[in-house]
Image (spheres, helix red, strand yellow):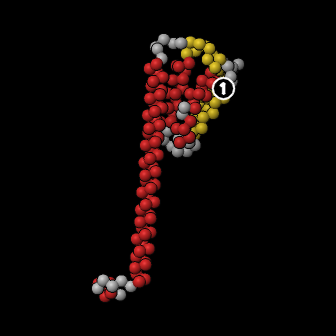
Amino acid sequence: STEELTEGRFPEKLNTNHAGYELRTLAQNFNRLSLQLKETEDARTKMVSDMVNHLYQLSEWKMESPVLKKELVPIHELLQTAASLFQWEMDNKNIVLHLDIEPYQVYADAGSIRQMVSNLLHNAIQHRKSDDPARIYVRILLYSCSTECWSMD
């Protein structure tokens, strides 16, 4: 009754209900805070990973001299290796990369090709606005003398 509450006497049932309510509220607050903490940690982890990837790319670029070092390069291996550096970021952005590249060698500067692929993938990842699945197709065929690259959302 109201009289019992004003006099500081709490019936047993009221204490139990009140304690249950307080515990439920506390548990909900802990859940909300743990989700916020997880999102913050995920964002920080991604930020650190992005910074490490950019630092790695920058160090590769600075180590290369401005003179092209042309050599026979297995193009399919080079593109697969460059793409693998971005796999985690592509997975997080719901992007699937499909490489249809016949195994052959080209006479080119491997560092420049690697940097070009890194720039293209980085731009695709950074400028992606939607969380819907996306696919990037890269197709290089030896005998057709053509290169195709397209994206489908």
As drawn, is 56 to the left or to the right of 78? left
Q: Quadrant of residue 88?
A: top right
Q: Residue at x 38, y 85 (%)?
A: 11
Q: Quadrant of residue 26?
A: bottom left
Q: Residue at x 53, y 42 (%)?
A: 92
Q: Given the current orientation, which residue lies at the most extreme right position? A: 143
Q: Point out residue 19 in the picture as x, y percentages from the top left corner.
A: 41, 74
Q: Point out residue 7 in the picture as x, y percentages from the top left corner.
A: 29, 85
Residue that mark 1 sits on: 101
Give amino acid for label 1: Ile
103 in relation to 125, above or below: above
Quadrant in which the C terminus is drawn:
top right
Residue 99 visible? yes
Q: Quadrant of residue 6?
A: bottom left
Q: How many marks?
A: 1
16 in relation to 122, above or below: below
45 in relation to 73, above or below: below
Q: Point out residue 119 in the picture as x, y percentages from the top left corner.
A: 50, 27
Q: Point out residue 14 in the picture as x, y percentages from the top left corner.
A: 40, 81
Q: Residue at x 35, y 87 (%)?
A: 1
Q: Residue at x 44, y 20 (%)?
A: 62
- Towards the viewer: 123 or 90: 90
